[in-house]
Amino acid sequence: MGATTTKIVAVTGNQAVAEALRQLNPDVMPAYPITPSTGIMESFTKFVSDGKVDTETILVESEHSAMSACIGASAAGGRVATATSAQGLALMWEMLHIASGYRLPILMALVNRALSAPLNIHGDHSDGMGMRDCSWIQLFSENAQEAYDNTIMAYRIAEHKDVRLPIAVNMDGFIISHSIESMTFIPDAEVKKFVGDYIAIDPLLDIDHPKSIGALVLPDYYMEHKRAQHEAMLNAKKVISDVSAEFARLFGRKYDLFESYRLEDAEVVLVALNSAAGTIKDEVDRYREKGVKAGLLKPRVFRPFPYEEVGAALKNAKAVCVMDRADSYGGYGPLFMEIASAVQPHRGPVLFNKVYGLGGRDLMPLDVDQLIDETIEVAKTGKAKMVKEYITVRN
Amino acid sequence: MKQMNWKELPHAGTVLKAGNANEYKTGSWRSLKPRWIEENCIQCLFCWVYCPDSAVSVKDEKMTGFDYDHCKGCGVCAMECPGKKGNKAIVMEEEGK
């Protein structure tokens, strides 16, 4: 624990992330409001009006323009952030690839929300999973504290010279973004010191050195550019670990590539992202009290995905239930596909996949109990009766 | 020219040297080639103005010929050329003739 004086506050997830952004004090913040991320911009534009940040906000006419303005401002040499959800992120899609291809360390607060149609404003991970292949670093957060901490760490990861990729910090819409939780903020001066100054690589506003970005690259060079981008993503894993270790040393909260909850000797394991992990931890505790060796693996870093580490953590489990809050229709859930790839080199556990919580449907403790019961059964028989199945759905 | 491998590329593929498009030859796919007929040229420089590339060579405010490393043979210069007394100073000819 560092010399940090901690004060416990009660805030929503959106307020927590807005506070992190105030402390990070980006140069430019282009955004277009969309539920449930609107609260971040509401709070942040108030900071701007009150003169609490030096940030120039650009209120644009669409999310495509928001991400385009992020790219322009970042290429110019600024530290840049934005916030969005669901359809807003979907509208950014084209520009998400430009941001990563230009290797711009833009920070996005992504408040996870279900994609339409049917129109729905509540939390699931279909938006975040939709940007899986856009070469953005993706961090997931169980609660407001984690969303705040991940946001504080984001620029250190994205701006590292071996990485230089954009980064998205995910948290669940409404469940976290609009719920008040107790958490602690790090004092401004300590955040400032931890994050440090931004030194852009080849900024366009360095007018003594004229340059051109976004040039046409044909088949003779395109693959070399993409290979370099792949390397940056591979490098990100170590940088995330290093930055998280430094964060833990200074501020006392420890984050790994994924959280292992009572996983060490676990035979039946649930895997889930974001807020569902909170409910699952309670139920894991209950089953542990009954003598069941239950555990949870909660990925924090989804891109780059820590295959070797997750594989090693799961290799001694008997059965693993991977819970997806998004579907890849006609395929397995996106998280399941990653976990299957991770355990594949080992003579690993039996895996099965449950799709839950779409469009913000609640995951209740009893639902988790049913999953743990089923996982116990699969561990016993060594066979899953169905690889992928929707749960809490009316049949 | 030796091609760079992925470790040698400039960060993010940024073009760091102004005007280096001049080193990238793009004239090889031309099928029609402009030929300059100097005796018909009134040095109006319409060809230089209209060229969508920078393939008309000019020295001391005078047209001196074409940069065939970059001319793609679009024919705009020949079309716009007023020539002298009805005789064009630029005519398009098939490559390889």
Image (cartoon, rainbow, N blue to C red):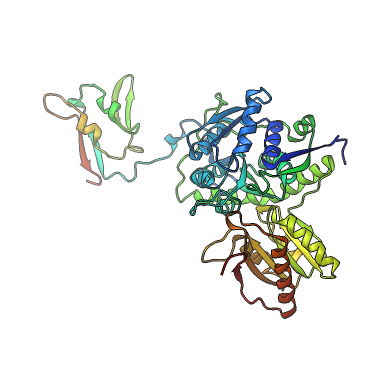
In this rendered view, identify the residue nearer to me: A372 or A65. A372
The image quarter in which residue B22 lies: top left
Q: Please name the residue shown 68% across and 39% down the image.
A: A17
Residue A112: x %, y % from top left: 61, 49
Image position of A65 with respect to A393: above or below: above
Percent position of residue A287, x then y: 81, 67
- Depth check: give the residue in front, A249 or A384: A384
Residue A211 in the image: state x and y as whole percent: 52, 31
The foreground one among A112 and A359 is A359
Residue A359 visible, this orientation: yes
The picture places residue A379, in percent across and down from the top left corner, at 74, 75
- For the C terminus of chain A, give its image quadrant: bottom right
Residue displayed at 29% across by 21% down: B62
State the image quarter where residue A193 is shown: top right
Instruction: Check the image and report above or below for B62 versus A305.
Output: above
Pick the residue in front: A279 or A25.
A279
**Left or right: where does residue A258 sit relative to residue B9?**
right
Hey, which residue is sitting farthest front in the picture? A394
Find the residue positioned furthest to the bottom: A381
Count all numbered tags in the image, as a single digit: 0
Q: Position of A101 compared to A243: left or right?
A: left
